[in-house]
Image (tube, grey):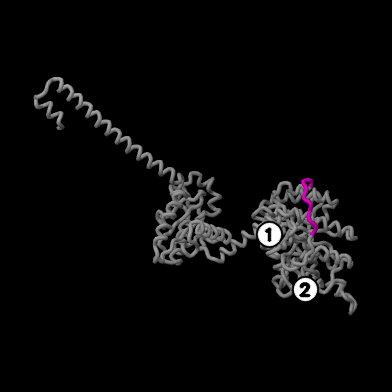
Amino acid sequence: MDETDNFATSGTGTNGDKRKLHAYAVKNQSLRETVHRLRRQVEFLEEKQQELQELVNHDPYTGLPIRRVFDRRLDERFRVLSAETNSHRMMALGVIRLDKRYARIKNSRDRNKILLFKTTARIKEIIGDNLFQSDRLDEFHIMLNNMPNLAAVELICEKIAEEVARPQEEPADDVSFGCYLGVSVYPLHGSTRDELLGNADIALERCEKLDRPFIIYDEEMGREHRDRELIESELATAVETSFEQFHIAYQPFVDPEGRIIGAEALMRWHHPTLGTVPPPVFIPIAEQTGDIRILGHWILYNACRELTVWHHSGFPDLYISVNLSPHQFKQRDLVARITGILQALNLEGRHLKLELTESMVMDDPDDAIQKMVELKQIGVRLSIDDFGTGYSSLNYLRKLPIDMVKIDKSFIDDVDRSVPNQEIVKGIISLVHTIRIDCLAEGVETKEQMELLFSEGCNAIQGYYFSRPVDNLSFRSYLTAGGLLPAARLETAPKGEESPLPPDRVPGSLPVGGETDGGADDLEPAPVMEVTEDLGLL
């Protein structure tokens, strides 16, 4: 009871005073009710604000804290670590990405993202609240504090990979998928957020490339990544500067009589400071960046233009063979582009052979066969490269409109010594001849290999036994010498007869090696192509 109540009940005061006091009491009660109502509204707003914060800072599908929250907590952790001077504990940062099996079912079996939610719940059972949502729905970040050593980090990574790979619960127990996990560790692999996350991404990329569930970053991995970035950057610059750093090498195809019947055009890159960059190094990078499309057209045009020189030199039946990349083969206007090149150079289609890999054809057989038929209609010859390493079968071959198969070098290396390889090669030659397809063997390096292959009916060979890949001037010298390669000439030449080529061009004096190395440093640059819209090269 307050003072106004005491005053009202004491019987003192005038009626006017009592009315004033009563009004004051009523107003005071109303004020108390207003304060109470405002307090409830504030509590309601605070509750809604908390819910809003949860919505803003957590992913709606997985319920995990989003990347912004991860960054804040990571910054806080770095402040703690910078204040610790004697701590030997490590912090591991990782990036988890679900594999392609999840990508295949996410829009069919997991439209409501239930499997995604359950997968993150499994990971949280191992590492608790140290799991965060990345900017991608199928990717997550982890932060493992106070790790005693790398072995402890590896153990947790292994548990995560095993848990994710377990089959899902009923009714989706027929569904399973895995993950890739790239990890970097403070302070071994960096001292800043950007360094550690960048190195974790490098480890994740290596995981996907090697198809391994988890990899912890190391310095060698970092050097390889930096080298790749350098090649990628320099390759882009080389493409933009009129292809002046690129050359074409030509390796002859030889028939059983030692005559040149054609050649394969091989890309070579000589960088002003890096030196010769091997094709196995830069071609995969060009495939990934898309530069292979314009590089492929550059070599197509310039190789065909060099072929016209050979024809004008008195060898009108020679043909040129060019490898098509998967990116090129998938281009919808591929046939139109090749038609434009042939018309611009006044070449018949039969003088161009395109080499395809088995995997390129089998990636989408129906589309591939349709495109191959269109190429055949303009007269272009087709060959399957690296035959014997993929889907080789009579049923597979007879469906393809091809003219030739090239036996992979791996079967040729010891064909003169290995009985199993001899049987494989004999079987391939017999198989392709059954359906009237020619056979060419690559990587021939010895007389014994050559004799065995030709004795079994191989139509042509390619390899160091006759010639390594050479520049355009050296190849022209082969032609001016009669189109019969030195190795064949020396077999029948009278004693004392000298080869018309200088000693460093005589195949017998060349070192034995793979077909993608050697011969690039001294190559004569091929004429630079004038890229025009008329040829459709851009």
Amino acid type at mark 2: Leu
Which residue is nearer to you in this view: 420 or 247? Answer: 247
Whether residue 70 appears in magenta in the rendering, the answer is: no
The crowding category of the residue bearing disc 2, from other C-alpha atoms within 10 Å (few below 14, some 14 to 19, many at least 20), is some
Whether residue 531 appears in magenta in the rendering, the answer is: yes
SS state under label 2: loop
Which residue bears the numbered disc 2?
510
Q: Position of residue 538 (x, y in %)?
A: 73, 48
Which residue bears the numbered disc 1?
283
SS state under label 1: helix
Q: Residue at the location (83% across, 58% down)?
A: 306
Q: Position of residue 145 (x, y in %)?
A: 41, 60
Amino acid type at mark 1: Ile
Q: Position of residue 232 (x, y in %)?
A: 64, 57
Q: Which residues are magenta?
A: 526-534
Which of marks 2 and 1 precedes in the sequence?
Answer: 1
Q: Is residue 106 visible?
A: yes
Q: Residue at the location (15% across, 23% down)?
A: 18
Q: From the viewer's perspective, is residue 35 above or below residue 147?
A: above
Q: Position of residue 116 (x, y in %)?
A: 47, 49
Q: Residue at the location (68% across, 59% down)?
A: 283
Q: Residue furthest left?
A: 11
